[in-house]
Image (tube, coloured by chain):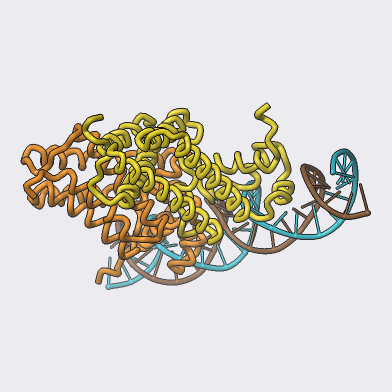
Chain colours: A orange, B yellow, C brown, D cyan
Amino acid sequence: MKSMASTSDKILDIAQSLIVAGGYNGFSYADISAAIGIRKASIHHHFPTKAELVSMLVDRYRKQAEAGLQSLREQAASPADQLQFYINYWQSCVENASQPFCVCAMLASEMQMLPEEVASRVRAHFQNLAGWLTAVLQAGVEQELFRLDRRPEEQAQMLMASVHGAMLSARAFGDPGLFIAIVAPEVARLRTADR
Amino acid sequence: MKSMASTSDKILDIAQSLIVAGGYNGFSYADISAAIGIRKASIHHHFPTKAELVSMLVDRYRKQAEAGLQSLREQAASPADQLQFYINYWQSCVENASQPFCVCAMLASEMQMLPEEVASRVRAHFQNLAGWLTAVLQAGVEQELFRLDRRPEEQAQMLMASVHGAMLSARAFGDPGLFIAIVAPEVARLRTADR
DNA sequence: GTTTGCCTACCTACTAGTAGGAAGATTGAC
DNA sequence: GTCAATCTTCCTACTAGTAGGTAGGCAAAC
């Protein structure tokens, strides 16, 4: 019974996939309306304005990501495994073409023309992600699983940039395999020699 | 007398900065009209449709990039310098906030909803860039300036992803310095130990 | 004397957003 | 338990504004 999603969740689901495909200006209430068989006005009932809709969407996305990353850390897996699962998540997204792009990366590229309430939420997500990656790298260094040649914060930024850049490249070339071809070596390089 | 640009060039200039800021769906003929003081209909005289306008824009961008990269190689600078100049170019763009983003990277993120005539041109640019980077890395290896731990084509893809991912991060965090903080270590890593 | 560049005036389709109402479920008072 | 008030969800019908694009004219340049 997984398909008992509420209407507002369905709206956010569709909106998210539309944003991933075409950005903030790449979808309209009419598109959502057509996709889930509801009138435009009903969407305005759930989300009065487009800026609010996308704000709620990013909030939901950030919470989901936070929860996912947090549970990854609590599963007592080693930092190396935690990082690998993070990469695997995006790899499977890209290869299934389900959500082959991070909705916040998409919105980040349009940052300059986003309503401020949306932009600040996008920044918050990246702040969270960078923080998580930094902590994982830091822990990995302490356990001698990783050898970094930069400060963990810097290395986390570099990794984040690689992952999102790899998504961009994979999409530009229409080659999902490109994602892991770019990211895997970056991750491998962090690992200590004995593995 | 650098300001004697033709109207159609002015149109493309404005369009490019608008796309960089907001993507394909983030600008309109009315925006261009307002920016250069010409009527909408006059823009249609130069570029009948939006898809044609952006196609011509990407063609121009690709040619400029090709010429720039080509001249870099012909200036007999070492592959290490060529790579450095490429990085420097984007660094200054990002820091001056002039064109703090690659128009093709922007369009690539919207690939799925771009008119095919535009999409194919964006792909062509990335193909060119990847080819240039591969050749530079290859030459650098032969001159023992670079030590790669991957095939040059792969390493070129990784570098391209880093550069574009770094642009995204710099913009997301509103911190131009982030670009070089991410990219410089990636480049440094390619260099052989003796400098 | 046709081509070029720009104009006014217009079109249709679509944008986000609103007003007001119908149907059903939820709640509280008796 | 029943009845009425209220809340929720969705609807039809509409608004003002903007999207990309067109028709046709005018003036100057080639």
How many numbered badges does the structure rendering display? 0
Residue B38: quadrant of the picture: top right
Who's the residue at 18% across and 48% down the image?
A: A188
Residue B160's x, y, as percent? Answer: 37, 45
Who's the residue at 47% across and 28% down the image?
A: B96
Residue B75's x, y, as percent? Answer: 47, 34
In this rendered view, identify the residue nearer to me: B76 or B66: B76
Give the quarter of the figure containing the C terminus of chain B: top left
Q: Is residue A49 visible?
A: no
In this rendered view, identify the residue nearer to me: A77 or A185: A185
Give the quarter of the figure containing the N terminus of chain B: top right
In this rendered view, identify the residue nearer to me: B4 or B42: B4
Above or below: residue A39 compared with residue B124: below
Above or below: residue A87 compared with residue B87: below
Residue B33's x, y, as percent? Answer: 68, 42
Who's the residue at 73% across and 50% down the image?
A: B45
Above or below: residue B148 compared with residue B180: below
Left or right? Give the position of A49 relative to B182.
right
Above or below: residue A123 compared with residue C19: above
In this rendered view, identify the residue nearer to me: B86 or A6: B86
